């Protein structure tokens, strides 16, 4: 049974991003743009911290990877809601491009849940790059307003990352964590594991 005492320090930073969501939503509901953005900046900062700690202290785990992914996803969702609230015209003007980026992402999520019963946690270099650019774009937009060249880069990297993620799902029969990218996946012996050994993860 999972209890709070089972969490390591990296897990707690991931857990913070999850429990911070109600606080962020309150500031969003109150339309306190500046306060909301500073709190969002703290949440994004914990994403870098937990990954660093997990690698530095060698405390990576399947549970930690799932917590990290969950924290990333809901923080991104709150950030996108904030853009809708505070930069509504920009979102309306660019709905097509946003759909091009996010429809494949939702397809990828459905494929993952159908195959593994949960979201992926590959944490590829491309996924980390995409998350970084998304965070920078959202924070910059909320602090200063949107800049289009960064928006376009975010869309392109996001689409490429989703394509890579879908490819990795088809390459692995069982759920695995921490795959650096397609190149490394080709050399990863875990690709040979079959579904009957998924209990190991």
Image (cartoon, grey):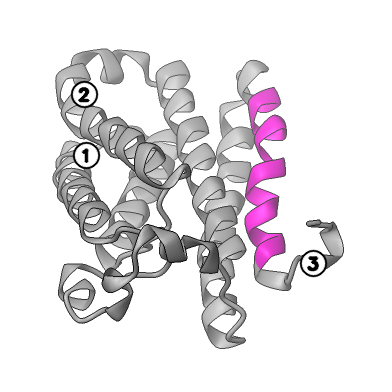
Q: Does dot 1 land on a helix, a strand or a loop?
A: helix
Of 72 and 90, nearer the camera is: 72
Residue at position x 70%, y 52% in the image:
16
Question: Which residue is denoted by mark 3 in the rendering?
Answer: 6
Mark 2 lies on a secondary structure that is helix
Element type where label 3 sits in the image: helix
From mark 1 to mark 2, how far is it between C-alphas?
A: 13 Å
| Picture coordinates of residue 85, whole percent (x, y) | 47, 17
Mark found first going from the N terminus, 1 or 2: 2
Judge from the rendering whether residue 25 lies leftward or rightward of residue 140; answer left or right: right
Q: Earlier in the sequence, mark 1 or mark 3?
A: 3
**With respect to residue 163, does 145 lie above or below?**
above
Q: Residue at x 64, y 26 (%)?
A: 25
Question: In the drawing, does residue 61 fall left or right of residue 166?
Answer: right
Q: Residues within 10 Å of mark 2 (few under 14, many from 20)?
A: few
Q: Is residue 28 left or right of residue 113?
A: right
Label 1 – label 3 distance at C-alpha: 39 Å
Q: Residue furthest bottom?
A: 57
CA distance separating discs 2 and 3: 39 Å
On residue 112, the disc is none
For this view, does 163 lie left or right of residue 52? left
Residue 2 in view in this figure: yes
Q: Main secondary structure of the magenta part?
A: helix
Residue for point 30% across, 13% down: 89
Give the label, 2 or 3, closer to the camera. Answer: 3
Residue 99 - label: 2
User: Above or below — where is 169 with respect to 192?
Assistant: above
Q: Which residue is mark 1?
A: 151
* Magenta span of residues: 11-27
- 10 Å neighbourhood of mark 1: few (<14), some, or many (≥20)? some
Q: Position of residue 3 (x, y in %)?
A: 84, 57
Tell me the quadrant of the picture where the N terminus can be found. bottom right
């Amino acid at each position: 049974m999972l209890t709070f005492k089972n969490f390591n320090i990296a897990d707690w930073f991931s857990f913070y991003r999850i429990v911070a969501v109600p606080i962020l939503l309150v500031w969003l509901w109150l339309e306190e743009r500046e306060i909301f953005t500073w709190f969002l900046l703290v949440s994004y900062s914990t994403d870098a911290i937990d990954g660093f700690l997990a690698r530095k202290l060698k405390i990576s785990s399947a549970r930690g990877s799932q917590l990290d992914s969950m924290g990333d996803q809901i923080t991104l969702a709150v950030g996108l809601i904030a853009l809708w609230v505070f930069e509504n015209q920009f979102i309306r003007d660019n709905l097509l491009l946003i759909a091009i980026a996010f429809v494949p992402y939702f397809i990828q999520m459905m494929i993952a849940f159908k195959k593994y019963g949960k979201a992926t946690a590959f944490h590829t270099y491309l996924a980390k790059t995409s998350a970084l650019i998304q965070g920078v774009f959202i924070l910059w937009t909320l602090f200063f307003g949107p800049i289009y060249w960064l928006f376009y880069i975010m869309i392109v990297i996001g689409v490429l990352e989703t394509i890579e993620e879908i490819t990795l799902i088809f390459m692995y029969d069982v759920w695995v964590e921490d795959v650096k990218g397609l190149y490394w996946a080709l050399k990863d012996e875990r690709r040979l594991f079959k579904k009957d050994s998924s209990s190991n993860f």
